[in-house]
Amino acid sequence: MPRPPRTTDADTLYHVWVRATGGGALFVDSDDRQRLLRILKYTCEKHGWLVYAYAQLTTHHHMLVWTPDDDLSRGMQLLSGVYAQTFNRERGRFGHLVSARFSSKIVETEAQAKELCRYIVLNPVRAGICERPEQWPWSSYRATLGLAPAPAWLHSDWVVRLFGRDVDEFRLFVDAALELEARSGV
């Protein structure tokens, strides 16, 4: 029996995340990561989405995405479905790649949006993949800081404006969390 559609809203900002089944790998190599970004580009073009932040880890990925229409589920079905089909075909595997459906939460305040921008780009650091977020090439942080080219579908200028039109304000906000975690031994 099919699941009922999720209730979503038009003109809404979401934190969205997708996990691999059973803690397995969602990304095996850089080709996988680039493939998801290409499919995300297509999804943004097709649905008019704006992506403000993202991070790809090994077992999951996060996005901060704005949807102009009530189509988060359709877009995520496209993104995850095409990615999983290609991943499985290339590896001669079958079955579910992602666990259940995507997860999402509506972002209701500017303070939440700021915290999520930081949370998303700090995911690789907190997972022990790198020491600093700018070292991780598979997130939006480098592009937001101007250290790497931004894909056309990434609207990092929105993140910069959220922090007062100065990219250093965002960098300081991210660094403050790192310093606090270092002092507290987290």
Image (cartoon, helix red, strand yellow):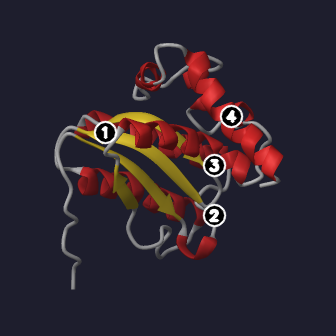
Q: Position of residue 35 (x, y in %)?
A: 52, 44
Which residue is at a point 63% across and 25% down the rendered structure image? 171
Q: Which residue is the site of mark 4? A: 176
Q: Nearer the viewer, mark 3 or mark 4?
A: 4
Which residue is at a point 41% across and 73% down the rendered structure image? 100
Cα–Cα span, label 2 and label 1:
27 Å
Q: Nearer the viewer, residue 32 or 51?
A: 51
Which amino acid does the dot numbered 4 rest on? Ala
Cα–Cα span, label 3 and label 1:
20 Å
Q: Position of residue 144 (x, y in %)?
A: 55, 24
Numbered tag placed on residue 66 in the rendering = 1
Q: Position of residue 107 (x, y in %)?
A: 34, 46
Q: Earlier in the sequence, mark 1 or mark 4?
A: 1
Q: Which residue is the site of mark 3? A: 123
Q: Which residue is the site of mark 2? A: 25
Which amino acid does the dot numbered 3 rest on? Asn
Q: Nearer the viewer, mark 1 or mark 4?
A: 4
Which picture quadrant has residue 31? Answer: top right
Which amino acid does the dot numbered 1 rest on? Trp
Which residue is at a point 25% across and 38% down the rendered structure image? 46
Q: Earlier in the sequence, mark 4 or mark 2?
A: 2
Contact (Cβ within 8 Å) of mark 4 with mark 2: no
The kind of secondary structure element at disc 1 is strand
